[in-house]
Amino acid sequence: MSQQKLIARGHPLDKLLRTERLPHIWCPGCGLGTLLGSFLRAVDYLVSKGVIDEKQLVVVTGIGCTGRLSAYVKLDGAHTPHGRAIPYAIGVKLGNPRLVPVVISGDGDIASIGGNHLIHAARRNMDLLVIMANNLNYALTGGQMGPTTPPGAYTTTTPRGNPERPFDVARMVASIGGNYVARWSIHYPVQLEESIKKALPRRGFRFIEVVSTCPEIFGRHVGYRTPPELYDRLKKVVRIKKPRALDDIVYDWEKEITLGVFRDEDEPGYMESICRLYSYEWCREIPEVKWARRLAK
Amino acid sequence: MPRVEFLTGNQAMAEAAIASGLRVFVGYPITPASDLFEYLSDKLPRYGGIVFQAEDEIAAINAIIGATYSGAKAMTATSGPGFSLMAESIGFAAMVEAPIVVINNMRAGPSTGIATGTGQGDIMQTRWSSHGHYGIVAFAPWSVQESYDMVIKAFDTAWRLRVPVIVLGDAVIAHTREPVEIHEPGEASVYERKKPRDPPGRFKPFKPDREDLVPPMAFYGEGYAVLAESLSHDERGYYSTRQEVYESLVKRLVEKIERSRDRIASSDAYYTTSSRVLVVAFGSLARSALALVRMLRKSGVKIGMWRPKSIWPLDEDGLVRAAEDAEKIIVMEMNLGQLYLEVSRILGPRGKTIELVPVISPQLPSHEELLSFMYKAGVKIG
Ligand code: SF4
């Protein structure tokens, strides 16, 4: 087969991509492509099954390597100032409750500069899916220490090793509430995809952390210089578990990074809660009500 | 049919927002804007709108930007400290051309300052709060009626030009109660967006119309795959570092306001014909200033007053006209000279003597007290 023919056929997910913007900026071997692939396959599936209309989706990102994702996805979206993806997405939902905002952003964006927004969105059980890529450092800005960086790790701002302790972000969100909390790593794209399929059409706050590889910056600084080396090093510590208590969830770069579903509830989200107080005309039409019925079946 | 009610400035602003079709209000408690938030919390849901309490002002402003992209008229209200927190995303709103309305009831700063005191120290902050160069519109009411009318004008301007519009109230106007003529909810005439004329695929979300430099606005959910891009972007909304793209974007964000200056810029002039002295004052201080002008006129001083209603942009032609017969201009404001800088820029080259009466006080001075501030500043009439 000629090469031309192969190119002409394209990729089955091209319809969800602004293909004219490719190639993307992500480094070879970066885990973010895996995340994007899982997300798009989940969206494609849900759209094909009629669970969701792609016109309803709004992909909101913040600043960082992950933040660039909204530019590649051919859906409504926003590339917001650093840390503000969550409040922007909440505004999208308030402005038109029939829409389905999805925040996809990095750990610096979501858990550091935007950390306050994260915990309050979880507290409110806001009808919102947040997918947080955790690449263990500030990558786009050159590899500074982040809220998820392992203790002792060498970064450009911790030249003698990181003296701080990291956040276990998924565990923190699970401790606050929200309807669905999970953590995966890019070693498990199928599990991640299934998780997104579950979490996207669901009411209330949903949070998925994706531990990702940043070989170009983080890996290089901590001594795993090639994509396979970092991939293997991370693979050694990620462990899928069914935690019975919050204390079973571990985030430790030396011993274990627990993966799995940490919370799986179906309580009414914020939008339904305000519909109990006021009879808005859209209350019957929000997708969350439909999804809750579907889940109950 | 309009009806007359007896409201505070904050209540009037809330009523005006409802009359303009407000759908989403996002607030964070702060004096002197909390009672506006409380008033809407009770009232807006009855008209189908949502009132949401954010975790901070940064969340509040970003949420209303998102809401406008969903097609909702959206607003927040705050005061100095909260307005400072919003700074970054004022620039974001300007960049993605989100038609938001922000009420900033000025209080005594800097920092926490005097939370219950009034102030006029946010003139330059309103213009330049966010980094980079962009355009902004701001109105400043001096009465409860104007608080009402200007919020309607703010919505109209925001949606007509796709710009963030600031209403600069102050602690005094916010809590003063006066009769005000108001419209029924949704009755105020507010510009509706220009809809995309091209179908999805061909539509470019940041391609401006030639006559007003404003791009038609596609809302989320309409199938246009529109990206609100905070990075420098081309007409498709795609990130670009190209010099021509960046230059035309930044210039357009400023020029679209310049081009509509006649519609936005407004001011009032009092006793300016053959007055040799012209007082310039705005907001609540202009009430005391006008009382002072009247007192002085009674004693035979040829003195008039000019009051800007739009602060950004200023009605420069109106100022020049009002100052025609004046030799001396006295700018009175509750800061150490901000509007003064603009007045000097405009009238300085015209050979006028321009003097400043700074009023640093948490309370609005009476007209007699204003006279003593004048003496303190060494400013003499005539
Ligand atoms: S810097 Fe790291 S996270 Fe960013 S694109 Fe490169 S590998 Fe991926």
Image: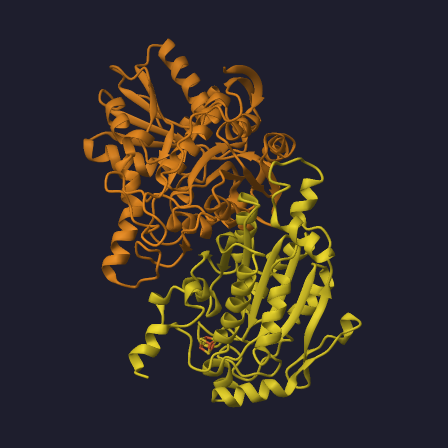
Q: Is residue B378 at all visible to an observer of this figure?
A: no
* B106 vs A57, nearest the viewer: A57
Return the x and y of residue B147 as percentages of the image width and height: 48, 26
To which quarter of the image does residue A129 belong? bottom right
Left of B123 or right of it: where is B381? left
To which quarter of the image does residue B378 belong? top left
* B251 vs B203, nearest the viewer: B203
Left of B240 or right of it: where is B167? right
Q: Is residue B17 at all visible to an observer of this figure?
A: yes
Return the x and y of residue A263 as percentages of the image width and height: 72, 65
* B238 vs A84, nearest the viewer: B238
Residue A75 position (above or below residue B333): below
Q: Quadrant of the N terminus of chain A?
A: bottom left
Residue positioned 57% across, 21% down in the render: B7
Residue positioned 50% across, 16% down in the render: B2
To which quarter of the image does residue A216 belong? bottom left
Q: Quadrant of the C terminus of chain A?
A: bottom right
Return the x and y of residue A292 as percentages of the image width and height: 69, 53
**Residue with the most extreme front position:** A1
Image chain in yellow? A
Residue B13 position (above or below residue A137): above
- Chain B display color: orange
Return the x and y of residue B259 as percentages of the image width and height: 26, 37
